[in-house]
Image (tube, grey):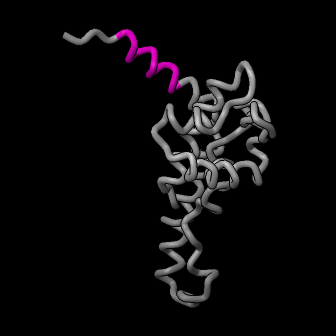
Amino acid sequence: MKFSKKSRYGITALIDLSVYSKSGHVALNSIAQRNGISVQYLEQVFGSLRRAGIIRSVKGPQGGYLLSESPEHITAASIIEALEGSYYLPDEILSGEFSGNTAAYAIQHRIVDEVNRHLDEVLQNVTLADLEREYMNCRQSDEMMYYI
């Protein structure tokens, strides 16, 4: 599975978009500035997210971005797939490299298939709304902390 900087930045930007788009579209440079991400890099990330139908853009001088659907319907799996492609560990038996190798079959079925099943279970069940709530809880905790 890949969980690259692109995925981390993409998810971070989507959490920001989810929080700040409640009253309208959000400019890319605002998201970039709040999160310390280059605008040029976010343009690439948002291009992938737009092609996957996760976000939509509003053209014009007052343009920006909106989520295409509610955060409750956007899963971590769909975000990572949009940015990285498949998140599964590769099936090496089907690739032919380990064809006929019984150890490879055992590894595939007992490790790779199990990891993929659990990975899918987690990523399909975590939504952007869940991540937004976690973000807001952390932000609220940070605001309540007193430093001496």
Eyeballing the image, is 50 above or below 136?
below
Magenta stretch prevailing secondary structure: helix
Place of residue 28 in the rendered image (x, y in percent of width and height, measured from the top left): 63, 38
Instruction: Identify the residue shown where x is 51% and y is 88%.
Output: 101
Instruction: Identify the residue shown where x is 51% and y is 84%.
Output: 102
Nearer the observer, 2 or 26: 26
Nearer the observer, 56 or 69: 56
Extreme residue in the left direction: 148
Place of residue 123 in the rendered image (x, y in percent of width and height, measured from the top left): 60, 46
Q: Quadrant of residue 32?
A: top right
Instruction: Identify the residue shown where x is 69% and y is 55%.
Output: 48
Place of residue 44 in the rendered image (x, y in percent of width and height, measured from the top left): 63, 55
Whether residue 52 sits left or right of residue 84 in the image: it is: right
Q: Was residue 137 drawn as part of the magenta stretch in this picture?
A: yes
Eyeballing the image, is 8 above or below 17?
below
Eyeballing the image, is 87 above or below 94?
above
Extreme residue in the front direction: 61
Place of residue 14 in the rendered image (x, y in percent of width and height, measured from the top left): 62, 37
Highlighted magenta segment, given as a residue range: 134-144
Whether residue 20 sits left or right of residue 145 in the image: it is: right
Instruction: Identify the residue shown where x is 54% and y is 59%.
Output: 114
